[in-house]
Image (spheres, grey):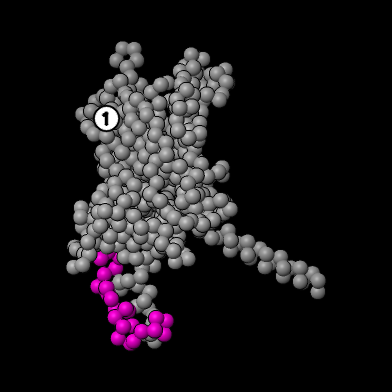
Amino acid sequence: MAVKVLLAILLCFFACESLVNAQDPAERRRFRFTTEAQLCKLDRIRVRPPSRRIESEGGITELWDEADEEFQCAGVGAIRNTIRPNSLSLPKFHNAPMLVYIEQGEGFFGMNYPGCAETYESQSAQSSRSTRRMGRRIGAGRTEEDQHQKIRRVRRGDMIVIPAGTVQWCYNDGGEDLIAVAFLDLNNDDNQLDLRVRGSFLAGGVPSEARREIRGSKSDNLVNIFNGLDQEFLSEAFNIPSDLVRRMQEERSSGLIVKCDEEMSFLTPEEEEEELSETSYSRRRGEDNGIEETICTARVQHNMNTQREADLFSREAGRVNILNQLKLPILRFLGMSAEKGHLFPNAQHNLHWSMTDHRMVYVVDGEAEIQISDDYGNQIFNERVSRGNMFVIPQFYPALARAGQEGFEWVTFKTSNQPMKSPVAGYTSFFRALPLQLLEQSFQITTAEAQQLKQTRRQHTLLFPPTSGSSFSRSRRS
């Protein structure tokens, strides 16, 4: 009898364990820093400016303070890079997965996955289409071809997904500054460290003297990681002269973003050529273990300014583009998503709360009045926000927005790969799903008033056109 009871207990244990392991990995991402990141006791939410500004030769790096209580609540961090023309943001990697939004400009963006092959190589000399050939001359007319992983052309409106620990770099070949805003999910399970933004640079970095002058002591991690290794060990590891190792470890005054001596060009085949070259490469290999199809060739880029792909559209109010795991499957493994919205002048974004995620909102253009209430019914945010402002909306906190006279454009970064909202008004409102009698008793109103409450805004969803009495208050200060 005792043996049967023991077997039953073991079966129950293994069944429960299998259910936990079968859960979507993204749903188990945010549990590690519960004591720090998810104690959201906020008396007030504030518009946060960058707390650190690092001037480099080729641009500016700005970092928000991840120790602020709102950022700790959401377990997130943020960086904004301004890259000047013909300048390069040096190769680096971070300790958490990132979503990078290209706010302005265009250029080249590189990401390097460990273990993935260099599927891009320069064309032969006989090819008339090799105008962007890369290589260096050796001896009498012989060329050593350059091989590398895919380099992406990015432009305004692009959202780029970067897994934790992935080496990345960006080069501005345009005529204006390239501005890239990065959101880091520090509380993601891929980050096994702490709730700090850690940038590890493979070249350059902030010199020690400059680090002492930078406001905030947390800039000490923006350094060249080769500095902590012995020259002899590195020389043996790379099988290169020690003089070259010293160049790799050198602390240059140019900083994190460098000005290039001359314009750079990269091999970026046309879309139809890319598909052909990758297919032929797989055939040459003669084998396929599935890795290339899931990681090495995963789509990590999506433009959020495309009106025809808008998920919500109103001729009178604006539009919203949503980026989730259905559009970029790689987001399923990172537990992140985003949306890009544009409200017309004086239009409103419906009062709602998020059921699944914390949100970090970055204002791209225009201005708006924002109100946020906490889960105790206290108003903790009632401000006017404008371009460049950033603020956090915690999970389950109701929020409402009304655009200014010039409209309102924003990007929201979310800590869930399947975000869900619960709107208060409109035809998807929870009021429409409640019986009339329940509304009457809950609010002590008449049947006619309950009917009005239930049917209000039934032709709208999340975006409301301006009403005759709506006006934007410019006197309010953020």
Q: Give neighbour class at mark 1: few <14, some 14-19, many 20+ (Cα, 10 Å).
A: many
- Region in magenta: 441-465
Which residue is disc 1 drawn over?
A: 85
Q: Is residue 326 above or below residue 116?
A: below
183 is within the stretch colored magenta = no
Residue lying farthest to the right in this orientation: 2
Q: Nearer the viewer, residue 388 or 109?
A: 388
Tell me what residue is drawn at x 45 percent, y 33 percent: 215
Q: SS of the residue at dot 1?
A: loop
Q: Does the magenta run of residues contain 452?
A: yes
* Towards the viewer: 204 or 388: 388
Q: Indicate the quadrant where residue 259 lies.
A: top left
Q: In the rendered view of the protein, which quadrant contains the N terminus?
A: bottom right
Expressed as whole percent of the image width and height from the top left, the position of residue 475 reads 26, 53
Q: Is residue 470 above or below residue 436?
A: above
Q: Nearer the viewer, residue 380 or 173?
A: 380
Q: Nearer the viewer, residue 463 or 324?
A: 463
Seen at 39% across and 40% down, the residue is: 50
Query: In the image, what residue type sits under mark 1?
Result: Pro
- In the picture provided, is 233 more to the left or to the right than 387? right
- Expressed as whole percent of the image width and height from the top left, the position of residue 263 reads 27, 25
Image check: 378 left or right of 472? right
Q: On the image, which quarter does residue 143 sit in?
A: top left
Where is residue 464? Give x, y as percent.
Answer: 25, 66
| Residue positioned most to the top | 140
